[in-house]
Image (cartoon, rainbow, N blue to C red):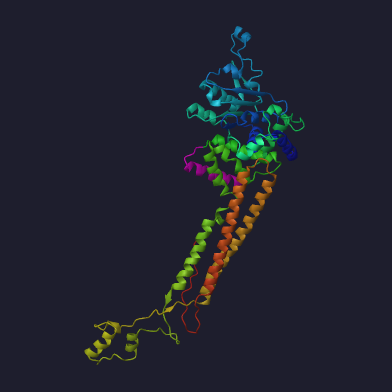
Amino acid sequence: MDRTRLARLLDALETGLVERRHVLRLCLLAALAGEHTLLIGPPGTAKSALARRIHRAFREARYFERLLTRFTVPEELFGPLSIRALEEDRYERHVAGFLPDAAVAFIDEVFKANSAILNALLTLLNEREFDNGAGRMRCPLISVIGATNQVPEDEVAEAFFDRFLLRLSVGPVSGVGFRALLGEGYVADAGELGSVPAVLQLGAAERAALLAAAMRLSLSAEVLDRLGELRAWLAEETHYVSDRRWVKIGLLLRMAAASEGRAAVEEWDLGVVPFCVAADVAGQQAVADWLAARLGVRAAFSPPRLTRVVEAFEAQLKAEREANDLDYDEAGRLRFSAVDVAARDGVFHEHDTGAQAGALAGEIGDAKGGAAALRMTYARKRRYGVLHVAARTGQIDALLDRLAGYREELDARRESLARWSAQAVWADPGFIAAAERNLGGVAAALAGLEQRASTARAGFQALPRLDGAGLRPAAIEHEPLAD
């Protein structure tokens, strides 16, 4: 599909709508993928107007609309019984002009109907087929837009609720939107919307071609990995999403790319997924936050992981700065304590009296003379050889190279998001902003870690050095720090 034509079509459909742009676009995307949308919100929030506008996007598409109540009978949805068929002992309905004959339908208060009607709707919505008498007829249904104030919790309602791939919350307009609603942009009803030019509308052949193009696209390993991670996370949160729904989500992502003329699904397209896997605003926001924090960021350069690596270097530097070492003299021999030196220099002799030995021992607080044993002192800070310092700085240089590579990769991801958002038709502005903030935060965290790693490198460079021939070097630790 030509993207310019799609943009013009959306401009025509959005004329006069206030704060409903993204909802309308998602409804149309679902319709292009052959899926259904449920609008959840109070009365008077333009739910029916959205459905009528979606109908205008398709050429020669019949429209059906009905408000359901607990007193609604099947004839109101599926058509009256055929008297002639009854005379011939056949139980058939006249479906012309009713839901089985419609391409786009709006069903208000969808959960108010009884279970018999809801069960009949299940097959119609999912298989696009309707049991009419002894036969099953194929229906031309493109998309159903349902509306409700709330979703009841019972088995039949849950099964029916699952038939709607997108669940969109529609509330009253904001304070700013209220002024626009009563101003020049006000359109009381879709009936006041000018006719969408036929050249912009989509015919049956075009819809089929677009669907075929979407089916030819494949999901990249990156997108599949993210969806797999999301599925696991939802399972941990005890939030079940059926396999059927995941398959439909895959098609919706492909349609988003194909309708924009792209050859591949990008990870940023996943911004539509929260509306498919969560039932309410709070759940959708939680999924959106989870995605925004992960899209564009590989596990290898996530700030928590790299922070642990830098902290390990900082801890090692602190330990080596504070470490004490054996004290050597200028000849490379160990220095000893005062009693050790006295013994070495012959102050103690075999013929010394006990009193003499005791007096000397008493000076160091050892009446038994045990202080005369050789004792090494630890009176100076440890010194390090060239190889040791080179090993440590080499490790940090490798980390800095990795950080620089991650920064370049992250810059490329940010550019990718900017390009995608500039031409994206279906994107949620709020999701784009959240993804941009997250990538910016990761970039700032990487810059901070680079600075800390460079500071640690300078610290290793400044460690006390061995400065004389014959001085024994400290042990060189070649093992890498765990990341």
Q: Is residue 481 visible?
A: no
For the N terminus, the quadrant is top right
User: Percent position (x, y) of residue 172?
Assistant: 59, 35
Q: Is residue 98 above or below residue 188?
A: above
Q: Residue at x 69, y 49 (%)?
A: 419
Q: Residue at x 34, y 91 (%)?
A: 345
Q: Is 211 covered by the magenta stretch?
A: no
Q: Residue at x 54, y 31 (%)?
A: 162
Q: Residue at x 47, y 43 (%)?
A: 236
Q: 208 or 478: which is nearer to us?
A: 208
User: Percent position (x, y) of residue 80?
Assistant: 61, 14
Q: Main secondary structure of the magenta part?
A: helix
> To which quarter of the image does residue 405 belong?
bottom right
Q: Is 225 covered by the magenta stretch?
A: yes
> To which quarter of the image does residue 410 belong?
bottom right
Q: How many numbered discs?
A: 0
Residue most extreme to the bottom? 351
Q: Is residue 74 visible?
A: yes
Span colored in magenta: 220-240
In the figure, is residue 194 to the left or right of 346? right
User: Percent position (x, y) of residue 203?
Assistant: 73, 29
In the figure, is residue 233 to the left or right of 133? left
Q: Is residue 167 above or below residue 322?
A: above
User: Percent position (x, y) of residue 437?
Assistant: 60, 51
Q: 73 or 119: which is nearer to us?
A: 73
Residue most extreme to the top? 87
